[in-house]
Amino acid sequence: MKSQMSVQPNLKEYTVSELSGAVKRSLEDGFGFVRVRGELGRVVRAGSGHVYLDLKDDRAVLLGVMWKATAARQSIAPEQGMEVIASGKLSTFPGQSKYQLIIDSVEPAGAGALMALLEERKKKLAAEGLFDPDRKREIPFLPAVIGVVTSPSGAVIRDILHRLRDRFPTRVIVWPTLVQGRGAEAQIAAAIDGFNALTADSGVPRPDVLIVARGGGSIEDLWCFNEEVVVRAAARSSIPLISAVGHETDTTLIDFAADRRAPTPTAAAEIAVPVRSELLAETLNKTRRLEGSISRLLESARGGLRAAERGLGRPEDIFGAASQRLDRFSDRLAASLSKRLSIADAAFARSSSRLLPGALRPVSRASRDRFKAAADRLVRAKDSLTRPLKERVTSSAKLLESLSHRNVLARGFALVRAEDGAVIRTSSAAIAARDVRLIFADGECRAATEGFAPGGPAGGSSARASSGAVSKKGKARRPQKTVQETLFD
């Protein structure tokens, strides 16, 4: 006990601060730069922006801290359960007598760790229904405005604009964002929400479709498109969204939440709009088909009308006899009534001669009045019976007149008949007949057919009018001194 007390006065005395400073210097000198591999345990982001975390393995725990500026530069946001490699220097925190790792950078401990984290996050978001196919909407066939979320300085936006200009020029609104590094995920999510928040009063048109685009890169470069904030923004977008992140082999979580995935940004432009030249060609093709169908329909209707016209015949042939019978019956009825009145008058006169002169006058006047009233009733009955028949005959005559070939002749056409009155419909029949009659609206003339020219403008024979033309009333006109030119030149 005595010897121990004698040794103590020879030791240097340190204050707490001095000893803490000495330990700090020793650690920093001995471990000026280290790389530590471990699993992230507790991860806390303070209000100041600093990040405090625990690096651990199965036997020890190491405290770590990333200052605000350092945390903002990281491409991967540290999360609990990630296996990482942290680089920095060892130091102490004298206020609590703890040593800690001042972290300069954090990177995943290989692609396997990132893929495991990605798979875990994918299962979590899929369980929430963010990737359900029923939530996906159709891309508009021909959008008037396209919104693009990407970097304004990269080659991606130039490729999209070039492809849209080649296929179908469309108005494009670009929302510039970061597409890599810390803070990129927040800007991308804000751009998607910003496009969806546009209204008619915003002064900027609301896009009909959105394209979120970025070129290819490593899994770390594309990690911002795997962040939950971006995936949730894409899932809640009311505007149909196309994901065009990376190359065809790259897959990010926004691809599952988007309404359509494009293998490249250029392919996204091809999905967004059709090819204008193909649309024009298809429109012209359908227009020609429609015109052809209408022409065939009209030609079929004309053929049916011509057949009906030939079957009906002339109105005067059908209704002439009936009209004549009606006139004869009307005349006979009027004559019968007159004769009946005459007989009644004679009978009345014979009867009245046997009556006294004073009583004859009232009886004769009353009888005459009765007979006159009866005659008036008969006339009215005759008119009421014959009026509907006359109206039907008049209506049918007008209908047949409207369908008559004379209306066609009045428009400048001519009817060709043979000498026996048969209608000539072909050029070969005209050649065989030789002498034909050309019937116009105001009369007819005679003509002689010559030759046969299938390829001619009239598609058949030619004819020369004879010197004697027949007028509308059928009387022959005086021969002309000059020969009339052919009617079919």
Image (cartoon, rainbow, N blue to C red):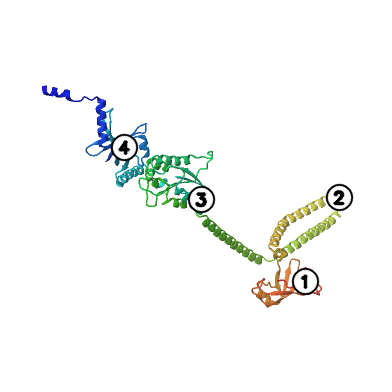
Label 3: which secondary element: loop
- Residue of label 3: 142
Q: Earlier in the sequence, mark 3 or mark 4?
A: 4
The nearer-to-camera label among 2 and 1 is 1
Q: Nearer the viewer, mark 1 or mark 4?
A: 4
Q: Residue at 85% across / 54% down in the picture?
A: 352
Q: Which quadrant: the N terminus?
A: top left
Pointer 3 or 2: first along the chain: 3
Gap between marks 2 and 1 measured at Cα? 68 Å
Judge from the rendering whether residue 306 lies leftward or rightward of residue 242; answer left or right: right
Which three-letter amino acid code belongs to the residue tagged 4?
Answer: Ile
Q: Nearer the viewer, residue 8 or 413?
A: 8
Q: Are marks 3 and 4 in contact (CB under 8 Å)?
A: no
Q: Nearer the viewer, mark 1 or mark 3?
A: 3
Q: CA distance from mark 1 to mark 3?
A: 68 Å
- Residue 361's label in the rendered image is 2
In this view of the protein, can residue 1 be seen by the observer? no
Q: Mark 2 belongs to which amino acid?
A: Arg
Q: Nearer the viewer, residue 144 or 455?
A: 144
| Mark 1 lies on residue | 470
CB of mark 2 within 8 Å of CB of mark 1? no
